[in-house]
Amino acid sequence: MTSQLRPLAHMRYKREASAIPKHAIELAARHLPSRAQSVDDRSYAYQSVGNLQFVSLKPDQECGRSVADSQTSNGHRSFASLNAAVQAAVPRSQGPAPTTNGSNGVSGTHKSDDFLRLSPPQQDLLLLYGTRQKYSLEHSQDIPELRGDDEILVQVLAIGLNPVDWKGADYGFSQPSYPWINGRDFAGIVVKAPRKHSRISQGDVVFGTCTDYRDVRKAAYPEYVVTSDSNVARLPQGVEVKEGAALGVAFVAAALSLTISLGVDFSGVPHASAGPDILRAARSLPKHEVAEDWIAVWVASTTTGQLVAQLAELAGLKVAAVADLAKGAQRLNDLGVDLLVDKLDEKRAVEILKGVTGGKLRFGFDAVGNDTATRLQEALQQNSLGTKSHLLGLTGLPKQVATGVVHHKVPIKVFHENAAVGEALVEWLEELLIAKGLKLPEVEVAEGGLAGINDALDRLRSGTVSGRRIVVSVASTDRSRSNSGTNTPSHSPAVSGAFAEAGADLSYHDKINADPDRVKLAYWVPNVSGGLVISKIPQRTNWDHKSNIRYAQTAERVGFEYALSQIRFMAGYGADNQHEPVSLSTILLAKTERLKLIIALLPGPWNPAVAAKQIASIDHYSDGRAAVNIVSGWFKLEFTSIGQWWLDHAELYRRSREFIQCLKGIWTEDKLTFKGDFYQFHDYSLKPKPLVLPGLPYPEIFQGGNSDDAKDNGGAVSDYYFMNGNTLEGFQKQIADVKARAVTHGREGQVKFALNGFVICRDTEEEAVRVLQEIQGKADAEAVEGFRRQVQNAGASTGNKRGMWANSKFEDLVQYNDG
């Protein structure tokens, strides 16, 4: 069996004949890392033995050899015996020789032998560099040190994923600063035991949860986690490692909700299922007599909901489980709940709860949020006299407190702040598992180890995982990946499958983009020939797709977050060749990892249904990195040459507004009906919709222009309003104007602003000015004049003559966005 196990440094494990069930030791074996470093200051080897009913891997002082083997004449000795020889001269009264983390505890005559020294042990972990970012797999990080006498160091075998792991990352809560380490649930092997007397020993296989989120040593996303001995349970025989990793925070939340928050007492429960008197340990609220009372659990199919239902039944409560019965009825029936209520019609669900309980529903547990908690409150008994009803919201509570209803939150911090409470809970959990008093949650093992966590969290984020827990095997982490591996790129979004082919180090990108209030940088994609100026000055910018791939990868590496592709349907004005922006943007997204592409769309040639379908698919391929720029049009010949109507300026922008309204409707409504002057839809349904990300219910929509028509579109329908060529005071006035229009359209605070600029970068201002003069001096006069004749309609045709290019001089038009 030893040959099947991978060593932890020079630690070795062996199996005694009947100590541990075969499946348990094989599972532990699959999770042991291959890193050749020790996490202890001493040399150890382990053998597995049974610790009563628990799985434990104990020190093997002979390092897997018999005594006879260690004393053979060939002189071979184990590391342990080498240490024994070195320390033999130390008097017993002095205890063991002092050790350091870098020397492996070797001293005495071997002190000068550099080959007997190990470098400090290191680990892999996941770091979060900012809100709405993906976790980054980092290598060669320090292993945390123990500080308190009750602390232990656990080598993580498995990580249980929780919704808070993605919600905290997306919405920025429970992360005091960046970069930060997250993760709640884990299972692993104790490699450093507490200094105080404890039920936890070195080698024990344990599982637990990290509720002290302010201490990054105690997060579950590194390979080694520090925790308190009162916050872990030992893994009983017959319980698999993955099952332990799925239990932690769900059990703690369920138990604390019922005991401290709702006042349920488990100490009087008969036989092996009796629990501790948590209320006494916490010195909290009075106990509530619960015999024959009802508790409604909304949604009971969640892991926490399942555990609340089971514990409530142990206490003698009748359980009404509200859930999606099409998915969770069988599981909840297996748990033995007393009443199943379908949540599909929430109003009807409330009526059923009231009817079955006779209007005397006393306890409510909501696992979803404010809205469902408000519904559940409607079902609770409400009166101003007599017994109170109690409502606990796991993630939110109603805004108004109903008469006779007491609101509660989960006092999750008490688990780590009060050692007596923590110890009581985990010992009770051990007893419940040994007595088989709980039906454990269904577990799905995700692939990729630490590197696959981003993909697994995306599944939680999308809501496609129901009624089961996702657990990650740390040993399956693909360590051959660099920081920018395909599933977990360096500080970048996860792009799964063959779509991701990049691999650059994006650490600088995220260093400068960690501030949520930062200015975001974008660049123009040169998908048209001739560069970005109408000049005969020698240029190094190429328009071919291979060059554009190189530009995109360089841009995201140095910190650019967006790239804007251009739209031209025919040649002209220094741009004799053009690549179509949607297809080229798809290629660039495939070759990058976190760069967003703002894809130019031109109403007229594009129908909004076709555009919506294209962008929705690309959004899925790229994990939400698609955006659009709606270009109203300025090149008359571009329309008339392909049989499209050429509209006057105001009509162009009116069509663009309808185009944007249709895009939003197609992306967000189940069926769109739209009756406009330019577009009509009748019960049109698009699937799949684009990804729904935090703060982004659909791909971002950009739109620009300087005219009143353009600014009104910005205020009415756009997410970003693009501005071109102006003074600082002019931009400030423009922003104020669009903000005021947004208020008029009921969109106050919903419009953001983007500014086009042309950068000339040289060592001195004088050099930069000379380059500008050279660009303008070598302008292609014929092309600039042709461009001017085409665009003059854009500004001059407006009522107040203030549109785009209305007052542009020759020198301005050399850079065709008034740079």
Image: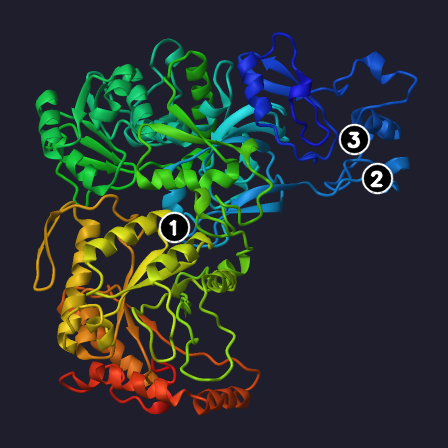
Disc 1: which residue:
622
Q: Is residue 738 left or right of residue 170?
A: left
Q: Secondary structure at mark 3?
A: loop
Number of the label disc, if any, that sits on residue 96: 3
Disc 2: which residue:
115
| The C terminus lies in quadrant | bottom left
**Residue density around tag 2, few if under 14, some if 14–19, many if 20 or more, within 10 Å:** few
Residue 374 % position (x, y) = 17, 39
Discs 2/3, front: 2
* Quarter-of-image position of residue 445: top left
Number of the label disc, if any, that sits on residue 552: none
For badge 1, the amino acid type reads Ser
Count the labels in the image: 3
Q: From this viewpoint, is residue 200 visible?
A: no
In terms of sequence position, does the residue under pointer 2 or pointer 1 come before the other? 2
Discs 1/3, front: 1
* Quarter-of-image position of residue 14: top right
Q: Front-most of 46 and 313?
A: 46
For badge 2, the amino acid type reads Phe
Q: Are marks 1 and 3 in contact (CB under 8 Å)?
A: no
Residue 326 in the image: above or below residue 661: above
Q: Front-most of 705 and 50?
A: 705
For badge 3, the amino acid type reads Pro
